[in-house]
Image: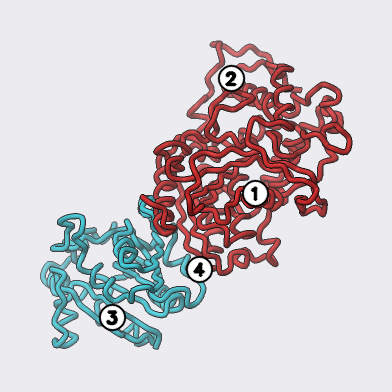
Amino acid sequence: MVSVKSVPSPGIAEERSHEADNPTSLLARFGADQPLKLDCGVDLSPFQIAYQTYGTLNAERSNAILICHALTADQHVANVHPVTGKPGWWENMVGRGLPLDVDRYFIICANVIGGCMGSTGPASTNPATGKPWGLDFPVVTIPDMVRAQAMLLDRLGIDTLFCVVGGSMGGMQVLQWTVAYPERVFSALPTACSTRHSAQNIAFHELGRQAVMADPNWHQGRYAEQATLPHRGLAVARMAAHITYLSDAALHRKFGRRMQDRDLPTFSFDADFQVESYLRYQGSSFVERFDANSYLYLTRAMDYFDIAADHDGVLARAFRGIKTRFCVVSFTSDWLFPTAESRALVHALNASSARVSFAEIETDKGHDAFLLDVPEYFDISRGFLQSAGKARGLGG
Amino acid sequence: MAIGQQTLPLPGLAQQGAEKQRADHLLVAGMVTPGSRVLDVGCGDGDLLQLLENRGIDGRGIELSREGVNRCVAKGLAVVQGDADTDLVNYPDDAFDYVILSQTLQATRQPKAVLENLLRIGRRAIVSFPNFGFWKMRLQLLVGGHMPRTENLPATWYDTPNIHFCTIKDFVQLCDEINVKMERAVALDLYGRPVPLTLPWWVWNMFGEQGVFLLTRG
């Protein structure tokens, strides 16, 4: 059992569970007449989507960009997070004069279905019982997330998206958008992702889920009713996952073998090394803002993702005749979604004669590079969007 | 190891302002019908692609160097990182109206296979390459007794990426061998001016510093 420094304060946990039902966000409620048809066969109803918008939709409704968030992110892209009080997760990309320019585009980001920041998920109240769904919540998939987003766009009166953007699990949603609704996506910018989750990635996710479920405080997913949290299990899951988001070189550059507030080893299992201390902090701070069951569901959704499998095993078939303009980006040190995965996607797009750009960016920052300060990524995103904007007739 | 490893500087064609285009690029672009779909194999920094896009042509590119690709993509060009020798097989038949191979053929491992692929993917191919039969080359080998080096091909024999040099005559023979038809052939002299069409082949092969060919399937 790993000792986690800070046990989440009940205040923040309470705040978060409040966010699950009554988010500090815009909210679209879908009643019994509009169920969400899930891949598992369940019609989810009623359900709700929490979302944020930035910028203004133009009169032609042609400048909307949908951002799809990654596994543990949410809709709070470029505003202060209501639970953590921290800045939005993509404030270096979204804003005035930035590649996703709020003066130019209308930007939407919705919490995924199965998430815990206001869109219906396992932390939401099950209307049938008045208690959190927990494991009674149906298993959702990446296509389910995208289907829900499409319903939100219908509600907002947006027929075609100028661009769909996202990294990691967000990139999977971007690809799913182009496959499920090609005519609604003018351009797509999937980053650090793949058309299917690899065996290694499923293995890491399974490790995380087992850590959560091994925590006695998990209570078969009914921890909320026991007024507790599987914080140790979820923290371990996060620590393991966080290693996969970085790289050997980045860890070495940031921490090396440096000691944490000491000069000599303590000959104990205390966090002697800075890297240990960092991981423990990552684990414990994550527990405060994220729901453990939601983590199980969203990792599962990624595991099931496999575009080719839905098209007779031939990836190129999924993109046949597609008009969407693509810009695929990968990072050299990303070993979670290595460049080879992006290259396979690009080959399939080429085989479909799609208009595709593909850039591999050299960085030691690992998978998380898409969230960090990587100027080349900003330049490429900006250039791609400007050129697509010209083709779309969006003014200068 | 094939595409765009070396952009060949062309004398007399240096950029003299933003609008100044390389003569061979203008010649190639002039061979392309407006509104068509073009793949530029070994597109470098995307100057030719940009020129084509400005003329309303739907252009795509493949480039070997990561830096070249990323500069192209940041300009908004549809360019992917790839290798002419290995990646052309991923493109379906007849995917493009034209496939361009500009100053790259001599750097491919299998020029014949590459040429065949160009004309499988595209209905037409436009190929330009430095002519090793150019008189200056011959003179260096004949008189100097060493592998030729010119302003356009400054690399020494041991570090050049150009592994399959040919003359205009050699290229014409290869086209015959794989049943490729030449729709247009132009030789440019050292200053980027076309060698007069009225002159016989051997003159082209002697005074053409590079050859530019518009090809179709035979």
Q: Chain of mark 4?
A: A
Which element carries disc 2, helix, strand or loop?
loop
Circle 4: is it few (<14), some (14-19), or many (20+) Cα within 10 Å?
many
Q: Residue at x 42, y 39 (%)?
A: A98
From the image, state whether disc 2 or disc 1 is nearer to you.
1
Distance between mark 1 and mark 4 Cα atoms: 33 Å
Where residue A13 sits: x, y (%)?
72, 22
Which residue in the protein does label 3 denote? B170
From the image, state whether disc 3 or disc 4 is nearer to you.
4
Mark seen at residue A273: 2
Distance between mark 2 and mark 1 Cα atoms: 51 Å
Is B91 on the left-hand or right-hand side of B206?
right
Contact, mark 1 vs mark 4 (Cβ under 8 Å) = no
Q: Chain of mark 3?
A: B
Task: Tell which of A264 and A159 is nearer to you.
Answer: A159
**Which chain does the cyan colour mark?**
B
Contact, mark 2 vs mark 1 (Cβ under 8 Å) = no
| The residue positioned farthest toward the left in the image shown | B143
Circle 1: is it few (<14), some (14-19), or many (20+) Cα within 10 Å?
few
Which residue in the protein does label 1 denote? A155
Contact, mark 1 vs mark 3 (Cβ under 8 Å) = no
Is A68 on the left-hand or right-hand side of A229?
left
Residue A82 appears anywhere in the view: yes
Under mark 3, the amino acid is Asp
Q: Are marks 2 and 1 on the same chain?
A: yes
Q: Establish if B205 lies above or below A81.
A: below
Earlier in the chain: of badge 2 and badge 1, it is 1
Where residue B190 sits: x, y (%)?
14, 69
Contact, mark 2 vs mark 4 (Cβ under 8 Å) = no
Which element carries disc 4, helix, strand or loop?
loop
**Which chain does the red colour mark?**
A
